[in-house]
Image (spheres, grey):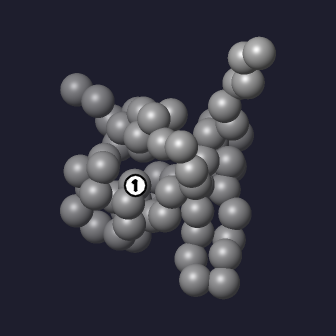
Amino acid sequence: METYKQRIKAHLEAAEIPQSVESIREAAGISNWNTALKHCLELLIQGEINGRKTSKSWIFWLEKEHVE
């Protein structure tokens, strides 16, 4: 069974732009916004995803490797 963190990373991998906590929550099937934020912040601290605090909330993303 996929964990929330695996689902979050899979969603961010497929995303073209940074994602809000709400969009991550919906995509990962997490029922509680605070739970989604907690998992995202843990992944951020572990260096597995990138994130930034905005004036409204948080956004998260994965660095894409640029192939030329």
Q: How many marks?
A: 1
Q: Which image quadrant is residue 4 in?
A: top left
* Residue at the extreme bottom: 55
Q: Which residue is mark 1?
A: 24
Q: Relative to residue 20, is residue 61 drawn left or right?
A: right
Q: Relative to residue 22, is residue 42 drawn left or right?
A: right
Q: Which image quadrant is residue 34 in?
A: bottom left
Residue nearest the observer in this picture, 44 or 60 = 60
Q: Amino acid at mark 1?
A: Ile
Q: Residue at x 62, y 39 (%)?
A: 62
Q: Is residue 42 visible?
A: no
SS type, badge 1 = helix
* Residue at the extreme top: 68
Residue 14 image point, x, y percent: 45, 35
Q: Is residue 50 above or below residue 54?
A: above
Q: Which image quadrant is residue 49 in?
A: top right
Q: Is residue 47 above or below residue 44?
A: above
Residue 68 image point, x, y percent: 77, 15
Residue nearest the observer in this picture, 12 or 67 = 67
Q: Residue at x 45, y 64 (%)?
A: 21
Residue nearest the observer in this picture, 2 or 57 = 57
Q: Relative to residue 55, is residue 40 drawn left or right?
A: left
Q: Is residue 55 above or below residue 10?
A: below
Residue 7 image point, x, y percent: 36, 38
Q: Quadrant of the N terminus?
A: top left
How crowded pointer 1 is (Cα within 10 Å; few <14, some 14-19, many 20+) is rated as many
Q: Residue at x 66, y 31 (%)?
A: 64
Q: Is residue 28 visible?
A: yes
* Residue at the extreme front: 68
